[in-house]
Amino acid sequence: MVQTYKCPGCGASLQFTPGAGELVCEYCGTHVSVEQLEQDQAPADYKVENQVDHSKEAHGDMNSYVCKNCGAHLIVEKHTSATTCAYCGSPAVIEERLEGVLKPAGVIPFKINKEQAKEMFRKWICTGFFTPSVFKKQASIEQIKGIYVPFWLYDYEAEADAAADCTRVSTERRGDYRYTHTDHYHVERRVRSQYEKIPADASEKMPDDVMDRMEPYNYGEIVDFSMPYLSGYESEKYNYESNDVSMVKRIEDRVNSYIYRDLQSTVNGYTGVTYLRKDISLRRKQAKYTLFPVWILTYRYLNQNFMFAINGQTGKQVGKLPNSKGKIWGSIAGITFGICFALLMLGGLLG
Ligand SMILES: [Zn+2]
Ligand SMILES: [Zn+2]
C-alpha cells in the first residue's frame, strides 16, 4: 500500500521538513508532528494495484501502485520503500516494505534540508580548479536526492586470549666493551571488550567506500522508526540480511581490528613482541536495522560515473570532481611560459 500524508489544513501532500523535526505544509504552513500523522492516517483507504503479487510477473523487478494524489501508475523497483510520484511529485511511502521484519528499529531524520544540500554542492563544485566549465554548467543540481540508506548497526562482544614472547633490550658500556642484554618475558593477556552500534550499509547500490567515509553519524539522535520521516525522500529496504556472508565479513574484519588494537594496548613497554598464540573469538549480540540520511547527486561525464554525497545529519561531504585535461595542460603551459618569461627578463637584466 502507498501512503501519502495529507495536510489537514489544505489537503496538499506533506514532506518531512529537516530542521523543524516534523512535517510542514509548504502551501499553508501547517505543522504536523510525526506522532500525530501516525495516529491519524488509517492506511486502509488506499487503493493498491496488484495486491496479490502478480505485479512482479507483469513488470519483472518492478511493482506498480496507484498514486493517491493524481491516480497515475507508479512503477517502483522491488527494493524501493519510499519515493515520489513521477507525474505529480507527491511523496509515496510503501508500507508493506516497512513492516514486519522489514520494519526499521530506528531512523536518523534529515537535518540538512535540500536548499542547504544544493548550496554545499554549488560551493564544492567551485573548489575544483580543474573542473571543466562545461561540467559546472551541465551538472544538474536539481537532481540532488535525499535518500534514507538502510544500515545494520551491530553490537559485538569480543575476546582475545594471547601469549607473547616479549623482549626488553638494554645496553651498558664496560671499558672498551659494550654489552647488550636482552631479557625475555612471557606475557599472557586475556582481553574482553564490548562494541556497540558498528555500522555497515545494507544497500546494493550505495558504494561501501562512500558510505564508510560518510561516518560518523551521531547515534544519540537515532529515534524510533516511523513512516512519516520518509515522506518526500527516497528509501530502499535492505538488500542484505544482517547475517548475510558479505555483511558478516565486513563487520567482523572491523571488530577483529578493534579487539586486536585493544589487546596491543595492554602489551606496553617492550622492545619486541612476538605472539605465540592469539585466539580471538567474536560473539554477535544483536543487529538493528536503521535508516541513515544521505543527499546524493550522481552524474556522468565523459563516460564516467561520479557521485557527490552529503551526510544528511552532519553535512560531511564525500565526492570526486572530474578533471579537464585541457585545463591541466593549459595551466602547465601557463606556468612554463611564466618561468621562461622570468628567465628572459633575468637574462635581459644581467646582459
Ligand atoms: Zn497545507
Ligand atoms: Zn501522482
Image (spheres, rainbow, N blue to C red):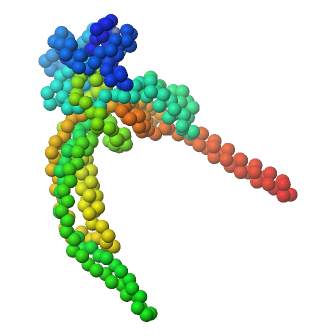
Q: Vertical placement of 14 versus 201: above or below?
A: above
Who's the residue at 50% across and 38% down the image? 322
Residue found at the very far right of the displayed protein = 351
Q: Residue at x 29, y 76 (%)?
A: 167
At x 18%, y 14%, the residue is 43
Residue 120 shown left or right of residue 162 in the figure:
right
Q: Is residue 68 visible?
A: yes
Which image quadrant for residue 60? top left
- Residue 116's x, y, as percent? 44, 27
Provide residue 162's location: percent of width, then percent of height.
19, 65
Left or right, 217 with respect to 35, comes to right
Ligand 1's image quarter is top left
Where residue 158 sits in the image (x, y, percent)?
19, 53
Residue for point 19% across, 68% down: 188
Task: Tell which residue pokes out farthest to the bottom in this image.
Answer: 175
Q: Pick out the residue farthest to the top.
A: 10
Tell me: residue 298, above or below residue 26: below
Q: Which of 152 and 20 lies nearest the eye of the viewer?
A: 20
Left or right: 246 as drawn, with respect to 129: left
- For the C terminus, the quadrant is bottom right
Quadrant of the frame with the N terminus: top left
Percent x, y for residue 258?
Answer: 27, 54
- From the viewer's perspective, is 154 left or right of 294? left
Q: How many marks?
A: 0
Relative to the observer, which residue lies in front, 47 or 214?
214
Q: Nearer the viewer, residue 298 or 56?
A: 298
The image quadrant of residue 206 is top left
Q: Which quadrant would residue 65 be assigned to in this image?
A: top left
Q: Is residue 238 visible?
A: no
